[in-house]
Amino acid sequence: MTVQAQNLPYQPAQEDESLLKQLFTQYEAQHKARLASLPTQYRDDYKKIYQSRWENIKARFDDKEIHTDKAAQQYLDELVNEIRQSNPVLMHKDFRCYFSRSSVPNASYIGQGIILINMGLFHRLDNESQAAFVIAHEIAHYLMNHSENAINNYVTRVNSKEIQEELRKIKGSEYGKREQFEKLVKGLTFSNRRHSRDHESEADSVAVALMSNTRFDPQGAVGTLALLDTIDVDRFNTAEALQSAFHSPGYPFQKKWIAKQQGLLGGHAELKEEEPLADSLKTHPDCQLRIQQVQTILAGQAARARQTDVISKSTFNKLRQEFRYEMVAHTYKANNYTRSLYLTILVLKENPADPWLITHAGNLFNAMYDAQKAHTLGRSIDLPAPGYASSYNLVLQFVQNLHREDMAAIGYHFLGRHQATLTAYAPFKEAYSKSAQIVKE
């Protein structure tokens, strides 16, 4: 974590390339050792799944998603150690937690003892007890071997007599082979990224048991699940935020920039109004049921003094705020300009005079202009889609509707509004100078 003097702009942490390489080499060796120890029976099936899991892990390193800041990692280790040292069953277990720069409000056990706590979730938590429950929940998945058991069950089922008989029948069919095969496979698809609902409830129970041996308040489990139950609700007023951020006297905000265009020639398809997500499609399903189950467990525990925050409330709050900036920076480095713009306006709405955010927004418009000019913008943006939140879709529509000249002018006039107050900030001067050159082209 970058230690800052008062009133200095935030500077996102630099990746520790050496550490990332070291960790990658370590986990790659573990993966190869696992492949070498696979059972002979159904070896090819096992190998495909474990290779798929490794590709998912590898992508986290390739994308620089693992947060390598020493101070942040030290704090996370202290949270984990409170759980580990209070539970002898964990003392010699080989797992490690890392912060992930992902903006998705989630956490996950991705295999090989690797637990990721996404910044997109951590910054939404209220206290350390909630963070402890998130960590303990993922430790529970690791401890209960949910990933490995799911792999074993899948391979066993795919190779069962019943499934093989179905495959033979399909192969012998004269018509509809493809449809029959797709119907069969649909129920057999394996995912390394999602645990079953039964596993989620079991992990909740184990997590509460682990927490109960610590100084953390197990009631943090209830607060976390209540948060997860509503975390998909989209309340952000993107239209107002865009207009507030990018309206300038010299280049007024135009409503057509956020209009959902229609037409046969080159128009953007209007997305259907999003209905509330069914529980089965939520990022975190069954939360109300899971809350009831956790409350039942907690009701049977003897009352004792608990602490909501155990390690450092000030560090917890500092990281929550810094992670919002880290996600903005990471999505930009990951070449996703629209996601970075969306995260920028979320934070900019609360901190409209922040020098780093202002400069970053200007750099985003400069970068989008350059990419549009080079006909490569499509590689760096998402397109409107029903699977995205409506607030994010409006940002995507906004970018889709802008001409290259609009991108240049919006960025230039936006930065110009802050020139008087940020003249001494070198990164701002550089962004504004580039914007001035672009607008003259």
Image (cartoon, grey):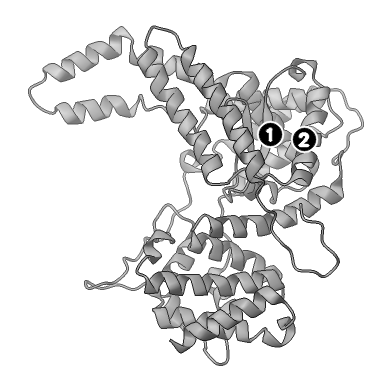
Query: In percent of the image, x 83 and y 23: which residue is there?
Result: 86
Q: Residue furthest front?
A: 18
User: Residue 248 — which label?
Assistant: none
Q: Is 181 drawn above or below residue 324 in the view shown? A: above
Is there CB contact under 8 Å for labels 1 and 2?
Answer: yes
The residue beneath circle 1 is 97
Residue 317 place in picture, x, y as percent: 80, 52
Query: In percent of the image, x 37 and y 28: which residue is there?
Result: 189
User: Is 438 left, or right, of 317 in this rendering?
Assistant: left
Residue 196 place in picture, x, y as percent: 51, 27
Q: Nearer the viewer, residue 410 or 107?
A: 410
Mark 2 crowd level (few <14, some 14–19, many ≥20, 10 Å Cα): some
Q: Is 74 drawn above or below residue 429 in the view shown? A: above
Q: Secondary structure at mark 2?
A: helix
Query: In percent of the image, x 81 and y 25: which residue is there?
Result: 212
Please tell me which of labels 1 and 2 falls first in the chain.
2
Q: Is residue 398 visible?
A: no
Q: Is residue 70 visible?
A: yes
Q: Residue furthest right?
A: 305
The residue beneath circle 2 is 77
